[in-house]
Amino acid sequence: MKKSLFVLALSISVAVSNGSPEHPELKAFPEAKEGQVRHVFVLPEKTRQEEVDFKVELIPGKVMETDGVNRIYLGVALESRSVKGWGYTFYDLTGKDNAMSTLIGVPPGTPMVEKFVAGKPLMIRYNSRLPVVIYTPPGFKIRYRIWEAGKEQSIGE
């Protein structure tokens, strides 16, 4: 038997700086510094027993104009940091805001297409008791997917 993960939710772009979702623990997280945007989202509530079967994939990126043919990636990643005095985790976007691309020839006359261009995704544990807080430069978006483990487990031998 194979161990499986199911994608529970499609990518949803959430970017909130003003008018952040209400959460009692949000006060522990610092406001965004000048030149940064604070992205906040609150996960659907689950019991601690349910949460062990879920993971959250954070996908940083930008909406950019692309040729629609080549695969494009950003040289950015999320780094976890700790809120001093609280022990809560937040995430900072690090790396260079440069796009890397495959080099497939584009047929003449191909129109440009706006697409979400992703950086390196980060998988974190599911914790509905705390908000997920991410700091990025302006222009970046955070998409996320919620993954659920399959009910079947395999025994490795």
Image (cartoon, rainbow, N blue to C red):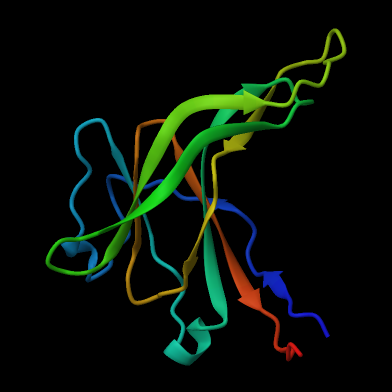
What residue is shown at x 12% (from left), y 67% (from top)? Answer: 85
Residue lying at the far front of the rendered structure: 157
Number of numbered markers: 0
| Residue at 52% across, 87% down | 50
Location of residue 154 (image quadrant): bottom right
Q: Residue furthest right?
A: 107
How far across and down, in percent of the image, does residue 4 sit?
Answer: 74, 76
Q: Does residue 66 appear to the left or right of 58 in the view shown?
A: right
* Quarter of the rendering containing residue 17: top left
* Spot occupied by residue 145 in the image (x, y as percentages of width and height): 58, 60
Q: Residue at x 17, y 63 (%)?
A: 28
Q: Is residue 152 at all visible to an observer of this figure?
A: no
Q: Quadrant of residue 149?
A: bottom right
In the drawing, does residue 148 fall left or right of residue 2? left
Query: Vertical placement of 26 versus 141: above or below?
Result: below
Q: Position of residue 86 (x, y in %)?
A: 17, 69
Measuring from the top left, give residue 65's x and y in whole percent.
62, 22
Note whether residue 91 is visible: yes
Q: In the figure, is residue 71 to the left or right of 32? A: right
